[in-house]
Amino acid sequence: MITLSPQTSKAEPSADQLLSWYYQMSVIRQFELRCAQSYQQQKIGGFCHLYVGQEAVAVGSIAATKPEDYVITAYRDHGHAIARGMDMHKLFAELYGKATGCSRGKGGSMHFFDKEKNFFGGHAIVAGHVPLAVGLGWAAKYRKEDRVTLCYFGDGAINQGTFHEALNLAGLHKLPVIFFVENNGYGMGTHVKRASAVTELKLRTEDAYGIPGKDVDGMDCVAMYKMTASALDYCRAGQGSLFLEVKTYRYRGHSMSDPQKYRTKDEVSQYQQHDPIGRLEKRLSEQGVLDDAKIQKINNEIHEQVEAAHQQADADPFPTSDDIWRDVYSNPFGPYLPQA
Ligand SMILES: Cc1ncc(C[n+]2csc(CCOP(=O)(O)OP(=O)(O)O)c2C)c(N)n1
Ligand SMILES: [Mg+2]
């Protein structure tokens, strides 16, 4: 029986914390809207999956981490990267294929990466990174380091074989990993009900792998923060892994070319009534922390930052043809490898 209660584990966040989360979610929203524009202007090549609507998931959960904790996610990775504190200029540069990009322009939208921030990507293959998260968890436990791995993936990932193999190992070895399934209702255009035999996703790991599951409102960054803080305590106490079903929703298409015939506009607008940014804006306005003028000022400031980062990236150079041979292999754990 685990004690994991988002209500009781942590003190209420302060007004400053809430304001900072409001700010971060708004940065992600504006970054994504600029991406949509840049994509239409053909500045971004390849796939591009926007995080609009899901901002509270990354912001609330990552706010509860320590810098030493590891973060790893799938291809819808812009929000997690920003919440982890990655530099927007380097992100735009990566999207535009520039040499100054966080992955030197060779990864693109789905492969953001920042070793300094312990952000381990950005992975394009559905559920392909879940075993990597287990590897990160194993490394932390083996080296007796106080690090928890936060691993994010979509509802489409949990029917993949790799997911089940990885969770079995995490459960068996009681690894310090929090698995977040960002259940936004759809894998591309297929509703969860048409893809999963058991649609209450939080139930799927306890009996199978000994990993308790909980659900959390992913449209509420405070709920995300509290649940994650509780889960981090659980992992840091050596109790093993947790599986969190995050109820969320994406407002935009799956990727940039999605006619969205699988859902109605009405469905989208119903979820938008619970918009994570709007909800927090209301709460902070009721507390007297925000008013119309402050909201306008914050949004203008963010707009300027996003535009400056985009313009800088736009003016940056592309990699040279010689760069194609660089960074093909790397050894990120150099000092830890056994000595010959
Ligand atoms: C192994 C694998 N199969 C298929 C794809 C194609 N694909 C890309 S995204 C996606 C849907 C995944 O949906 P979900 O996990 O719910 O994530 P979301 O897009 O909702 O964030 C699919 C099938 C892929 N990238 N990798
Ligand atoms: Mg999904």
Image (cartoon, rainbow, N blue to C red):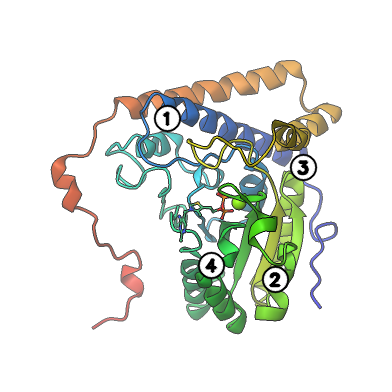
- What residue is shown with label 4? 160
Q: Position of residue 162 (x, y in %)?
A: 50, 71
Going by the picture, which residue comes out furthest to the left?
Answer: 322
Of the image marks 1 and 2, the number of the one nearer the N terminus: 1
Q: Residues within 10 Å of mark 2 (few under 14, many from 20)?
A: some
Residue 39: give its label: 1
Front-most of 51 and 87? 51
In this rendering, the answer to whether 314 lies above or below 129 is above
Q: Amino acid at mark 1?
A: Tyr
Residue in the picture at 29% in, 66% down: 331
Q: Amino acid at mark 4?
A: Gln
- What residue is shown with label 3? 14
Residue in the picture at 48% in, 50% down: 75
Spatial separation of the CA atoms under disc 4 and disc 1: 30 Å
Q: Position of residue 322 (x, y in %)?
A: 13, 45
| Pointer 4 residue Cβ closer than 8 Å to ligand 1 | yes
* Of the two numbered discs 2 and 3 in the rendering, the one whose residue sits closer to the viewer: 2
Spatial separation of the CA atoms under disc 3 and disc 1: 37 Å
Q: Amino acid at mark 2?
A: Arg
Q: Residues within 10 Å of mark 1 (few under 14, many from 20)?
A: some
| Pointer 2 residue Cβ closer than 8 Å to ligand 1 | no
- What residue is shown with label 2? 204
Of the image marks 2 and 3, the number of the one nearer the N terminus: 3
